[in-house]
Structures are given as C-alpha cells and as structure tokens.
Image: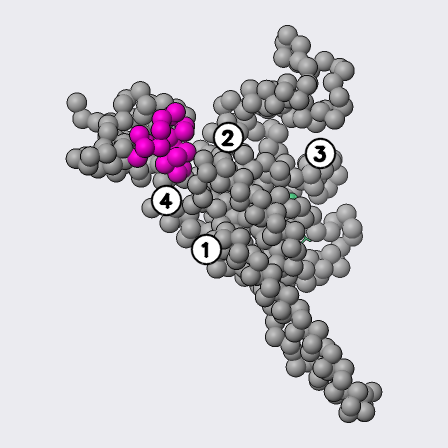
C-alpha cells in the first residue's frame, strides 16, 4: 500500500505548521531522531516510515484532516498565521504595536483577530461606556477576543485545573470551586470557569482568520505553542527590557526542548540615534546671545548632550545584539509619541488614545505609520520563509 504521506510532504507540513522537528516529535511522543527518520528521503539509511497511527495522532494533535493530503496531492493545512509581539516587560508597546500591525493587515483586506489578556483591553471590554469594543471592531476592522473566553487547546481546562490544585485551590466533586479559597485565586478561577463554558475554540478562530495576533501578558507557554512567529520587543532606551527579552528568549529555548527556536526574532523599539543637530546653533545664534563666547559654550554643551544620547543608543543597541536574538531589520522609533500627543490634544481624556487605536488609521501619512508598514512587510516575508 502507498504511504499516506511522503517524507518531503511531511517535512513541508511540519514547517507550515510552524513546528520544529523536536516539537513535532514531542507532539506524537516519539524521539527527535525517529521524527527526523520519518522526514529522511526514501533510501536514506536513517529513513523510517511513519505509521498510520502516528500520522493520525499527529493530525489530531495539530487539528489537521486525516490523511493530510487531498486526492490531487495538496497538503491540507490551515493557512492562518499567528503572530505575537511579546516580552515579559510591561509598557514597552506590545499592545499598540500588535493593534497597529493587525489594523494594517485588516486595511489590506485580510481577516484579522487579536486574542489578548491585556488589562486595559479588559477594562474597556467590560465597560458599558464608550469606547466600546464593538465600535473599534468596526473602526479598524479587527476582531478582538479576551483569551479567557477562548479555549486555546483541547486539554487547556485540565492543565489550568491541575495548576490551581497544585497551588492548593480546592474544587468540589462537581469541579466547582467552593467559597473559602484564597481570594488571590478569584480571577484565575473565573478564567477557568470561562474557559470551561466557552463555545469559542482556538481551532474555530484558526479557520476563520488569515492572521491572529496573540497579545498574552505573562503567558510565554501559550504564546510559544500557538504562534507561527514570535517577535520579542526590546526598548532601546530601557536596559531592563533587554534583560526581559533575554529571559523570555531563554524560556522559549526551554519550551523548544533546549534548542533555539527558528520562529523567535527581536524588534528594537524607541530606537532614535541621531547625530547632533545644527539647529541648536541656529537657535542660539540670535541677538539674545550676542556674546560669541557664550554661544560657543552653550552650543558645545548641547552638542555634547546630543552626542551622549547618540552613544547611549549605540551602547544599548550593542547590548541588544549581544542577546543574540536575531533582530528584524525593521526598527521602530519614538515618532509615535508625536502622533499620539496630537490625537490626544484634540480629544477629551475619555476619548483619548486607548488600547484599540492604531497609528496607521489615526495618522496614515505619518512616519510611525510607515514604520508599521515596513514592519508588516518584513513580518510577511518572514512568515513566508518559515513556511518554505
Ligand atoms: N509604535 C508604537 N505605537 C504606539 N505606541 C508605542 C509604539 N512603540 C512604543 N509605544 C509605547 O507603548 C506604550 C504603551 O504601551 P502599553 O503600555 O500598552 O504596552 P504593553 O507592552 O502592551 O504594556 P502591558 O505590559 O501593560 O500590556 C506607550 O508609552 C507608547 O509610547
Ligand atoms: Mg498590553
């Protein structure tokens, strides 16, 4: 009987799913070497046939049709790409960059969703007052989901319950949490209940969208499991964000069975190294500073200050490179600040910049919007490379 899948097709399928050989092997509980044998060409000494039961296990595990090849030889996999801008450090722009990239792809006509546990998102989602999630769904054409309302993988409820039990949380015979548990676990218990009762499954989202962005704070495990591409943010002005990027990179290596994952990249933000400007001299060269010596001194100070800022960026960029997280060639500057300030200056506090605003929609012709365009173009190219 012909094999259900050739070694080359199997490799292709695995790559399209964004899995390393180690992850594929782990998912069907075989050794790395065994999996590599499945992918080795017929006739190679290391080749071994993948059994039907292992292949069907692989398909179930990764929510593929079985067999995963159509009658006319096409691979049957879902083409949704899952991207995450992440890091442990808070406030570095994970959410605004996620929303801007998502909005840009939606503008281009793709079906796009964001799945998030961001607290700012939640506060808007729960509030009855504007700005409501519905309004923003329409305004930027992106669907938003609270991750607590999405079952991310089939055994997620069991995993969460086990984690809570091991923390000492008590459940009754019906699996409910009776009063008396430490209130510290209230929100984790609510999340568990919500995941138990939800009808929204990750698998359905994958079928519905071209791109899903996961914006999950403090959840590297789910981020790694679900994402096709992970972009770790590093703020060029914040040394602790560089440490944080290294920590999350190490966690991804752990989750990848000790190997560097091909799907993890870095993105430098707030990176604005500039040479000292001439404008300082122009301003100072006025009647107020008739004394030439003062002008010269002040100019020198300004120049030294600007040069120091340049060196600061340059040093931090070197620290970022030392992390050996492969950096995207795109980087972001702090130009978004100008557009956010302009947006806010024309609005009340309640209508000011919030989780759902995209710099691409708010200021389409601005430099920060162009940065997001470059970023998305590079993200698309990387996704293509990863699937080849
Ligand atoms: N390209 C960008 N567009 C918009 N904001 C940006 C961008 N880059 C960085 N930021 C900055 O991100 C900050 C707000 O981001 P926010 O605090 O929501 O980040 P976060 O990483 O999602 O935080 P949290 O960990 O709280 O979820 C703002 O201070 C903003 O200046
Ligand atoms: Mg956020």
Residue 59 in view (yes/no): no
- Residue 372 as seen in the image, left or right of residue 385: right
Q: Position of residue 7 (x, y in %)?
A: 25, 35
Q: Kindly identify the residue that appears in the image at 66 percent across and 81 percent down.
A: 278
Which quarter of the rendered picture does the N terminus lie within? Answer: top left
- Label 2, on which residue? 202
Depth check, front residue: 138 or 281: 281
| Sequence-first tag of 2 and 4 | 2
Residue 181 percent coordinates (x, y): 74, 18
Can you tell me whether the CB of the residue at mark 1 lies under 8 Å from the nearest atom of ligand 1? Answer: no
Residue underneath mark 1 = 378
Looking at this view, is 29 or 104 the one in front?
29
The local secondary structure at tag 2 comes to helix
Secondary element under disc 4, as helix, strand or loop, is helix
Query: Taking the image as drawn, is residue 181 in sight?
Result: yes
Frontmost of labels 1 and 2 is 1
The residue where tag 3 is placed is 126
Rendered view: 54 above or below 42 = above
Q: x, y (%) of residue 225?
A: 49, 34
Q: CA distance from mark 2 to mark 4?
A: 21 Å
* Residue indicated by mark 4: 387
In three-dimensional space, the C-alpha distance between marks 4 and 3, rounded to whole angstroms, equals 38 Å
Label 2: few (<14), some or many (≥20) within 10 Å?
A: some
């Amino acid at each position: 009987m012909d094999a259900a899948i050739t070694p080359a097709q199997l490799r292709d399928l695995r790559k399209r799913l964004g899995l390393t050989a180690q992850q594929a092997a782990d998912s069907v509980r075989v050794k790395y070497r065994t999996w590599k044998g499945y992918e080795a060409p017929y006739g190679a000494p290391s080749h071994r046939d993948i059994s039907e039961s292992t292949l069907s296990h692989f398909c179930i595990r990764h929510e593929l049709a079985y067999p995963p090849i159509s009658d006319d030889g096409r691979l049957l996999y879902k083409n949704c790409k899952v991207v995450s801008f992440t890091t442990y450090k808070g406030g570095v722009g994970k959410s605004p960059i996620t929303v801007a990239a998502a909005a840009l792809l939606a503008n281009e006509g793709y079906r796009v969703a964001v799945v998030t546990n961001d607290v700012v998102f939640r506060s808007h989602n729960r509030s009855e007052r504007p700005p409501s999630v519905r309004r923003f769904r329409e305004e930027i054409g992106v669907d938003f989901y609270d991750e607590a309302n999405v079952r991310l993988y089939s055994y997620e409820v069991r995993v969460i319950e086990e984690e809570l039990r091991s923390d000492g949380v008590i459940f009754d015979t019906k699996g409910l949490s009776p009063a008396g548990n430490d209130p510290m676990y209230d929100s984790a218990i609510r999340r568990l209940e919500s995941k138990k009762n939800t009808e929204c499954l990750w698998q359905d989202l994958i079928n519905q969208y071209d791109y899903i962005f996961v914006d999950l704070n403090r959840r590297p495990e789910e981020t790694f499991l679900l994402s096709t591409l992970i972009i770790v943010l590093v703020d060029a002005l914040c040394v602790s964000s560089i440490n944080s990027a290294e920590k999350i990179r190490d966690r991804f290596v752990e989750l990848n069975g000790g190997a560097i994952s091909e799907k993890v990249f870095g993105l430098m933000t707030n990176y604005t190294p500039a040479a000292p400007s001439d404008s300082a001299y122009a301003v100072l060269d006025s009647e107020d500073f008739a004394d030439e010596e003062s002008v010269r001194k002040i100019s020198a100070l300004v120049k030294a200050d600007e040069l120091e800022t340049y060196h600061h960026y340059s040093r931090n960029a070197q620290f970022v490179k030392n992390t050996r997280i492969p950096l995207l060639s795109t980087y972001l500057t702090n130009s978004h600040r100008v557009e956010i300030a302009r947006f806010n200056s024309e609005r009340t506090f309640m209508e000011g910049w919030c989780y759902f605003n995209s710099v691409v929609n708010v200021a389409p012709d601005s430099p920060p919007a162009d940065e997001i365009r470059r970023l998305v173009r590079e993200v698309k190219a990387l996704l293509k490379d990863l699937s080849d």
